[in-house]
Image (tube, rainbow, N blue to C red):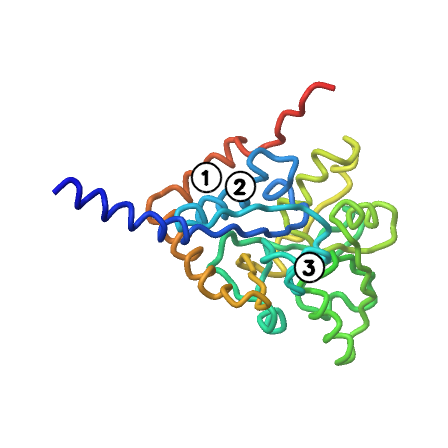
Amino acid sequence: MRRILLVTLLLYLPSIAAAQVQLKLLAGDYPPFLSDRLAHQGVIAYIVKEAGKRQGLEIEIAFTLWQQAKMKAQEGAVHGTVGWGYTPKRENDFVYSAPIYTETVVFFHLKNRHFDWQSLASLNGLRVGLSESYIEDAMLANFNQQGGDVVIRRYPNEVEKLRSLLTGETDVIIGNQYVVMDILRTVMPDDTRQHITFHPTPLRVTPLHVLLSRQHPESTRWVERLNRGIHQLKSSGDYQRAWSAFRMGEFGLRALPPE
């Protein structure tokens, strides 16, 4: 009987090995949630990798500019990219995973500027800074085509976008509430934070996803497996524990090796 069980197991092992898939994903720098400088590459990277691991997906995440991450994934040079909101246009090129995080996006401005956000019309006549590939790029471009008067300024990363506000190059900037506040705390001079505020009414609250390229025929099946892993993380409580650990600082800047 034991020999039968052993033979059965040996016959089964190749199918287990075949089920293992290695996926390479790209992302942009998005501290305090996602960055190569953070422990485990940040809480979002940790969640994505753990969800994949539970379904036989070995996920590697590398970092570049957001625009390059999307372009390389779109072309199929890598399997996908992490941390994107939904748009119908993107769905033409990518298969979306279940949500991995919900971001709150707000308007930042200098405290000495009166800014009352009510609708897109509130932006008429203003210079608005946003990151390349943000959902708002198409939104504001469409608004201008319909008669709006918004000057759109695009920046390759969050730091340059924030500096544009401080130098007067923009009147308001659009950004994740926690990402911009983290940059103010960790990158900018100590006296900078006191000059900047954000409007309490969000521009949007948006689920973010993993996007796998439709250039890879197996992407739909890979996303199904990843979604099962995300569901397992949430139903086991490990997803919630990861966010609790994040709030306790366990996904902060990783220690650098001595020079």
Mark 2 in CB contact with mark 3 (< 8 angstroms):
no
Q: Residue placed at 61% from the left, 35% from the top?
A: 38
Secondary structure, mark 2, is helix
Secondary structure, mark 3, is helix
Q: Closer to the N terminus: mark 3 or mark 1?
A: 3
Quadrant of the frame with the N terminus: top left
Mark 1 in CB contact with mark 2 (< 8 angstroms):
yes
Q: Residue placed at 72% from the left, 75% from the top?
A: 142
Q: Quadrant of residue 91?
A: bottom right
- The mark found on residue 86 in the picture is none
Q: Closer to the N terminus: mark 2 or mark 3?
A: 2
Q: Residue placed at 78% from the left, 75% from the top?
A: 144
| Name of the residue lying farthest toward the left | 1
- The mark found on residue 72 in the picture is 3
| Name of the residue lying farthest toward the top | 258
- The mark found on residue 43 in the picture is 2
Closer-to-camera residue (82/196):
82
Secondary structure, mark 1, is helix
Closer-to-camera residue (211/114):
211
Q: How far apart are labels 2 and 3 at the CA level? A: 23 Å
- The mark found on residue 242 in the picture is 1
* 216 shown above or below 104: below
Measuring from the top left, give residue 79's x and y in whole percent: 58, 58
| Name of the residue lying farthest toward the bottom | 146
Image position of 221 (left or right of 168): left
Q: How far apart are labels 1 and 2 at the CA level? A: 7 Å
Closer-to-camera residue (138/167):
138
Query: Closer to the observer: label 2 or label 3?
Result: 3
